Amino acid sequence: MENFSSKLLQTAVEEFSKLPGIGRKTSLRLVLHLLGQDREDVNYFAKAISKLREEVVYCKSCHNISDREECDICGSPRRDKTIICVVEDLRDVIAIENTGQYHGLYHVLGGIISPMDGIGPDDLHIQSLVDRVRNNPVQEIILALSTTMEGDTTNFYIFRKLQDLNLKISAIARGIAIGDELEYADEVTLGRSIMNRTPYQLTIPNPR
């Protein structure tokens, strides 16, 4: 345990170390960096974090993080509203957008089914996806979840919920290695996986 000369410094270090992937040494380095900045810059940083927490909202349609009721992607007239790409969270939206290969809409589940972590279908935005398909002219659903056991389980659950509806259900091509997180795939590989997607039925044994 470090011996700090200032309780204010100690408190700041402890708060930073609560962030994922930030140890106490890195936390101390970040705090000391802030102390070396102009007071105005540090105040702007603090206000940005506070405003983010207080004012950020989630899109009423896709559940993506947004500044208003409907996100810029859902509200854009240039997006293809007949296609919805299902992803786990905002990081996957950013990863796919960076490829420049996809021009449809998204649906952010807010996680994936993981019984070990106590996360079931009712904890995710799956029913709202079903409602979107039923109430909008959607022609294709792209399942773009990470190629892990939990991702595959979630894909299959969604497929079963949508299979009786009149639409195409696709899965991203396996250019993404088994067990990989979508956000860490390079843009070229991810872009090709989106463009070369295949019917989901072909990825599961004996689909019903």
Image (tube, rainbow, N blue to C red):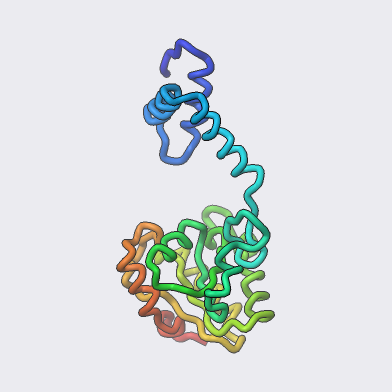
In the image, is residue 144 above or below residue 110? below
Residue lying at 45% horizontally and 70% vertically, measured from the top left: 144
Q: Position of residue 51 (x, y in %)?
A: 62, 41
- The quadrant holding residue 46 is top right
The residue at the far top in this view is 5
In the image, is residue 100 above or below residue 21? below
Q: Position of residue 14 (x, y in %)?
A: 50, 26
Q: Position of residue 94 (x, y in %)?
A: 45, 59
Left or right of 175 in this view: 38: right
Closer to us: 62 or 97: 97
Closer to us: 193 or 81: 81
- The quadrant holding residue 200 is bottom left
Left or right of 29 in this view: 106: right
Q: Position of residue 206 (x, y in %)?
A: 45, 86
Residue lying at 63% horizontally and 49% vertically, measured from the top left: 56
Residue lying at 40% horizontally and 82% vertically, measured from the top left: 198
Left or right of 144 in this view: 44: right
- The quadrant holding residue 97 is bottom left
Residue lying at 61% horizontally and 37% vertically, measured from the top left: 50
Number of numbered discs on residues: 0
Closer to us: 139 or 143: 139
Q: Quadrant of the N terminus?
A: top left
Left or right of 72 in this view: 186: left
